[in-house]
Image (spheres, rainbow, N blue to C red):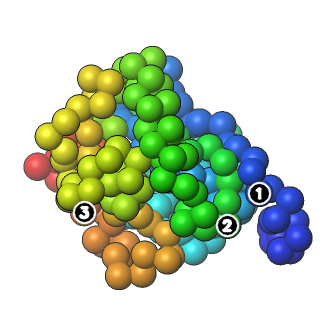
Amino acid sequence: MGFTRAELESYRGASVDDLMPEHPKLVFVGINPGLWTAATGTHFAHPGNRFYPALAAAGIIPRVPDFANGLTDEDRRMFLDAGIGISNLVHRATARADELSRAELREGAVRLAHDVERWHPPVMAVVGLTAYRQGFDRPKARAGRQDERLGGAELWVVPNPSGLNAHATVADLARAYAEPARAAGIPLHGRPSR
């Protein structure tokens, strides 16, 4: 499936529903939906995004879904059955995350804290250090497990898998994503549980 620039632009400002199991163990929180994500209704769907390849490389999911065309029901079930949820800090779709204002990120952080209290996951992973620093007003935060909790959940910050974050390889992302998965008790397929 491909989209013209005009088709993608028509999704500017749209939102994508959370992918959330009834009892999440681990919730990944992206910055906001990109236009391709909004067009397909699938988080992290841009063909150059390394989120799903990194999850598979970490053993968090058993295989890489055909995410660029939108997740199938079987793919969604793979996440839901594993107790993995996906949400966003800001729900408004943009072409680039840097189109978001600091105020939007802060409002998103407040909303997310309320959502986490409702979802009750033991572990949350915010995907993107800069967005975390701005949204949660933690300018000196570093990637990894945070000292604070969010709505009772252990809070992690992991690297952004966007192709724009090219210095992080799929292997780097996989190592970073495996840490909160282990903390949440997610069994890693084909990987030692350490």
- CA gap, disc 1 to disc 3? 32 Å
Q: Is residue 45 visible?
A: no
Residue at 75 percent of width and 47 percent of height: 14
Q: Look at the numbered disc 1 and give the secondary structure of its residue.
A: loop
- How far apart are labels 3 and 2 at the CA level? 28 Å
What percent of the width, then of the height, locates residue 52? 48, 59
For label 2, the SS is loop
Residues at discs 1 and 3 in contact (Cβ within 8 Å): no
Does 29 appear above or below 39?
above
Which amino acid does the dot numbered 2 rest on? Ala
Is 86 situated left or right of 47 in this image? left
Q: Amino acid at mark 3?
A: Arg
Q: Is residue 132 at all visible to an observer of this figure?
A: yes
Residue type indicated by callout 1? Arg
Q: Which residue is mark 2?
A: 95
Q: CA distance from mark 1 to mark 2?
A: 7 Å
- Residue sitting at the far top: 118
Q: Which one is in front in this view, the residue at disc 1 or the one at disc 3?
A: 1
* Labels 1 and 3: the sequence-earlier one: 1
**Can you give x and y, in whole percent of width and height, for residue 95 in the image?**
67, 66
Looking at the image, do the residues carrying marks 1 and 2 touch, with CB atoms under 8 Å apart? yes
- Residue placed under numbered mark 3 in the picture: 175
Q: What's the residue at 41%, 64% (across, down)?
A: 160
